[in-house]
Image (tube, rainbow, N blue to C red):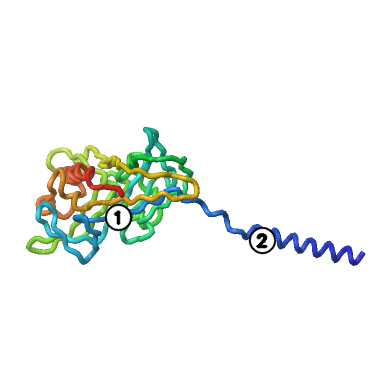
Amino acid sequence: MKKLKNTLFVSLFLLAGMLLYSCEKKPARKQIFLSLNFDHRINNTKVVLDMQYYTNAANNKYRLNEIKYFISSFRLYRNGAQINIEQDNGIHYVDLSYKNTLVWDISQNIPEGLYDSVGFIFGLNEKDNQSYRFNNPPESNMGWTQMLGGGYHYMMLNGWFYQADTMPLNIHLGRGQIYRGNTRDIDSLIGFVDNYFYVSLPKSFLVKRDRTATATIVMNIDKWFQEPFVYDFNYWGSHIMQNQPAMQMLKENGHNVFTIE
């Protein structure tokens, strides 16, 4: 009887150990189907923050200390069919101050096959651009003033430009405003303009099981100020919130800003 009890105790001990081991096992590693890298260049050279001086098409001398923005509604195309990326609600935040944001690893199950292009919204559309959806920094730091339409900045390019003196440079793109008359007083505000835009980039890549497809999305910052409109810091000034004509110009130029490799 005593031997039976000892045998039962040992069996229970081994079973408990097996259960504990199975609970501690790490979950299976998810496959990354697509890895997107984000690069930032001026005149085909990688951007250097804080130190490097640049000259835009209007001959404005400037430097940058912050580059941050949202892309959303990311999708892939092949033979006319569209695959929507649902991971992270299809939204990715890029910030040069946070290196982890410069890569977006997508582990969503993407059907195998040869894809011919990618597309995304620069900024956030009306559905996604809802105040307080991001509770934590750095995304929460992109909040757009509630009385100016709320939601979030689509982009912040911050730094300095040079006239007779050094001036702050805050190229902020987001929800624009329409005013009654020639004033920008809040009491004269009569409407809003959503300045997001769609970007389509041709890129051939193959998605296969047990293999990660890669691509690099390049923001060519000089083109924000170059084409089709030459953007002059001296004319538009340091701050462009509440200046819909300036934001409209950036929106139009933005269609030429991105390339993919």
Q: How many marks?
A: 2
The residue that appears at 17% across and 60% down in the rendered structure is 168
The residue that appears at 38% across and 59% down in the rendered structure is 100
**Quadrant that contains the N terminus:** bottom right
Looking at the image, residue 20 sits to the left or right of residue 96; the answer is right
Q: Is residue 185 visible?
A: no
Q: Quick one: 236 or 148, which is closer to the camera? A: 236
Tell me the amino acid under the disc marked 2: Tyr
Does dot 1 land on a helix, a strand or a loop?
strand
Looking at the image, residue 170 sits to the left or right of residue 125; the answer is left
**Where does residue 89 sit, x and y in percent of width and height?**
42, 44
Q: Considering only vertical position in the picture, is 209 above or below 164?
A: above
Mark seen at residue 39: 1
**Where does residue 95 sit, x and y in percent of width and height?**
32, 57
Rendered image quadrant of residue 5: bottom right
Tell me the amino acid under the disc marked 1: Asp
**Where does residue 208 sit, x and y in percent of width and height?**
46, 45
**Residue on which the image places disc 2:** 21
